[in-house]
Image: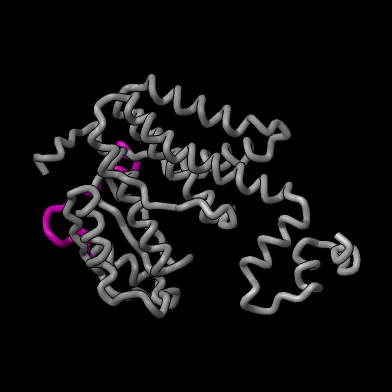
Amino acid sequence: PPEKHYSAQDVPLLQFAFANIAGEHLNKWFPGGFHLFPLNASVWALLVDQSASRQDTSPSWLQILTDSVYHYLRLALECSGQGLCASTEELRQGYRRYCGEGDRDHGSANESLLNQTALYEKEKEIVTWLMSEDNSRLSRELQEQAVRISHLPPQTAKIEALLLAAAILRLVQVQFPEWQMAVRPIEWDSVYKYAVSGDIAAWLQGYIHEFLQSHNNWLASKNDNPVKQATRFIEESYMGVCSLAEVAAYVHLNPSYFSNL
């Protein structure tokens, strides 16, 4: 769309944005039961295992996905369903039917594509910093990443910032849900409006700050003395079963010793 001023340089960024927007929705609707991959720069294939669909998945899920992509990226998503495939041969025939629908460009899948494995590698990198015996390393490394991004060309800075933000959010969702970090959708639209790398890095700093704060709060809760931990547990659980034995078990102490404390 003309108002977005997209250029050829934006293609990897748009692909990355689309893959993450679609992935967030599909993970809710078909957990572990879908595969989304690019055929070329603007064409993607989606395979869905209907038996993996959640009971509360809306029948209009494809329209919801289309609306979401348009809302965030102002891009029109055109879907060409090929029906159910019970065998690999039927899958091949479905692809042939798709190719026969008008004049389609079936370029290389590697054409200008952002390497999706980069997200996984970035997550592994963050976990390495987390597991370091140097407690300050996580903060130091993330801040250095933000500084590095602030000196990149804007288009590259956008991709790098979105990659790190997406890795942070997915890491918390999957590995550390107990951190109670407010996992919010990535603000794709706000990233596009930035023309200066410093502004992009400042946007990223919001995610880094929230991530570090959640990590520090979690560490502090682990280092609390048992009485503080027990007090919090009682405040949260007093409407249910909350006996001395249960509270003692929560703080991993013998009931009699905990009672003396």
Number of numbered labels in the structure image: 0
The percent coordinates of residue 42 (x first, y second) are 24, 47
Please state if 97 lies on the left or on the right of 210 as rendered: left
Identify which residue is drawn at 45% across, 38% down.
164
Q: Residue furthest front?
A: 260
Q: Quadrant of residue 147?
A: top left
Image quadrant where one finds the N terminus = top left
Image quadrant where one finds the C terminus = bottom right
Query: Is the magenta region chiefly helix, strand or loop?
Result: loop
Identify which residue is drawn at 54% across, 55% down.
180
Q: Residue furthest top?
A: 151
Q: Which residues are magenta?
A: 97-112
In the image, residue 169 sits, relative to residue 6, either above or below, namely below
In the image, residue 92 sits, relative to residue 190, either above or below, namely below
Please state if 127 lies on the left or on the right of 85 as rendered: right
- Residue 110 colored magenta? yes
Question: In this view of the protein, which residue sits in the foreground, 258 or 194?
Answer: 258
Q: Quadrant of residue 30?
A: bottom left
Q: Residue furthest left?
A: 2
Please state if 172 lies on the left or on the right of 132 as rendered: left
The percent coordinates of residue 88 (x first, y second) are 40, 69
Question: In this view of the protein, which residue sits in the foreground, 203 or 92?
Answer: 203
